[in-house]
């Protein structure tokens, strides 16, 4: 989706929080804890023993590669819920600006939560307030496909939120080779080719059809990935709906900064459809005007069909 800038990603946080399926979140957090428990034994030793970017002293615990980390919303959610793991986390994004914003916010929120925060170049160490658990977070600007290719089997798990739909399924499977053979993947909020706006507008079908037509496989990323995992003999342990649902708060506005989120969604849809040229300019302009007026009045409702996938790497 276009507009993947700091304001958009921050505005998405409350929408993301509501969308996550409990089942996938529980499986993900259990995997983070399980690797902690097995540190020095099963889970972490399942990796090939190479350090995923840190010193040996900090290799205990879980080792996670996060693809397209953005403003570190996932890590910040774990922090807020008291669920940060022990171990090592490599957060990769092509956009240095969002990654820097994410690092700064993570540092500030961890400090606020009583963590010891030690910067070490492109890494920060987060020392839990109540003990000796430490999470080493390394921030790496770059294409995660290249980063993953350099870390074959180094990680216990690979996580990518609102990201897997940006790549071809084969590229996602290649990315997961960064996890050890007994490792896991967590692909929450993977788009699955459904977009709905309401109240209805006469050209919704044409606009949405054209929008999906600009995407690889019409945006059915979660379905295709799930099929590929099944074919590879490793169906997802969790494959659950995790739709984004944004609607007015009943007072003419939207919760938190969700009006900003919706504005970027509208801009993205219009820009994609314009580029394709599948809807006449005047018709598209009318659709946009109507939707923007509804947004300004807090009347526009939006649903995007996503799924949370969690499982063992094939
Ligand atoms: C929709 S955002 C999701 C951000 C974050 N995961 C979240 O849930 O808040 C997708 C992110 O992936 C990044 N991105 C896109 N292609 C990438 C690639 N090939 N390698 C690394 N990051 C990429 C973008 O810069 C953007 O920050």
Image: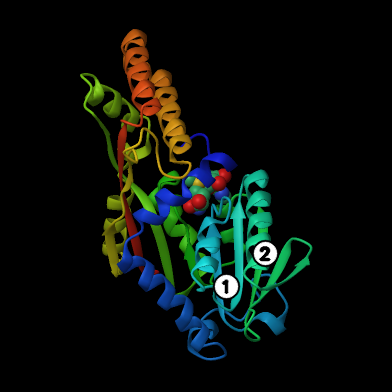
| Circle 2/circle 1 CB separation < 8 Å | no
Residue position for label 2: 138
Please tell me whether residue 294 is drawn above or below residue 284 in the rendered image: below
Residue beneath the point at 41% across and 18% down: 274
Quick check: can you spot residue 314?
no
Q: Which mark is residue 154?
A: 1
Position of residue 248 in the picture relative to residue 62 (left or right): left
Rendered location of residue 87, percent (x, y)? 60, 77
Please tell me whether residue 206 is drawn above or below residue 235 in the rendered image: above
Position of residue 31 in the picture relative to residue 59 (left or right): left
- Secondary element at image label 1: loop
Which of labels 2 and 1 is toward the front?
2
Q: Which mark is residue 77?
A: none
Residue beneath the point at 32% across and 31% down: 300
Position of residue 66 in the picture relative to residue 221 (left or right): right
Residue beneath the point at 61% across and 73% down: 88
- Secondary element at image label 2: strand
Rendered location of residue 133, percent (x, y)? 62, 83
Give how far apart the Cα atoms at labels 2 and 1 are. Answer: 14 Å
Foreground pick, 244 / 177:
244
Residue beneath the point at 44% across and 55% down: 172
Crowding near the residue tagged with mark 1, few <14, some 14–19, many ≥20 C-alpha atoms within 10 Å? many
């Amino acid at each position: 989706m276009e507009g993947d800038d700091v304001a958009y990603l921050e505005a998405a946080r409350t929408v993301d929080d509501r969308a996550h399926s409990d089942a996938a979140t529980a499986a993900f957090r259990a995997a983070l804890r399980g690797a902690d428990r097995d540190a020095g034994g099963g889970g972490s030793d399942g990796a090939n023993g190479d350090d995923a970017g840190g010193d040996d002293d900090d290799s205990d615990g879980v080792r996670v590669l996060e693809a397209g980390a953005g403003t570190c919303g996932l890590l910040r959610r774990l922090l807020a819920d008291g669920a940060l793991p022990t171990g090592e986390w490599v957060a990769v994004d092509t956009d240095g600006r969002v990654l820097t914003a994410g690092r700064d916010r993570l540092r500030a929120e961890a400090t606020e939560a009583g963590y010891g925060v030690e910067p070490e170049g492109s890494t920060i160490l987060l020392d839990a307030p109540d003990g000796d658990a430490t999470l080493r977070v390394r921030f790496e600007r770059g294409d995660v496909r290249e980063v993953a290719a350099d870390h074959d089997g180094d990680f216990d798990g690979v996580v990518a939120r609102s990201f897997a739909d940006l790549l071809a399924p084969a590229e996602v499977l290649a990315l997961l080779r960064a996890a050890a053979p007994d490792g896991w993947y967590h692909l929450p909020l993977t788009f699955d080719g459904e977009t709905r706006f309401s109240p209805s507008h006469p050209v919704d079908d044409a606009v949405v059809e054209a929008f999906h037509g600009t995407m690889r496989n019409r945006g059915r990323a979660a379905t295709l990935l799930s099929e590929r995992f099944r074919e590879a003999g490793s169906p997802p342990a969790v494959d659950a709906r995790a739709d984004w649902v944004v609607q007015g708060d009943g007072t003419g506005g939207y919760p938190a900064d969700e009006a900003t989120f919706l504005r970027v969604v509208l801009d993205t849809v219009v820009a994609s459809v314009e580029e394709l040229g599948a809807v006449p300019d005047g018709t598209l302009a009318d659709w946009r005007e109507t939707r923007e007026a509804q947004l300004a009045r807090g009347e526009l409702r939006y649903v995007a069909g996503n799924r949370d996938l969690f499982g063992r790497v094939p």
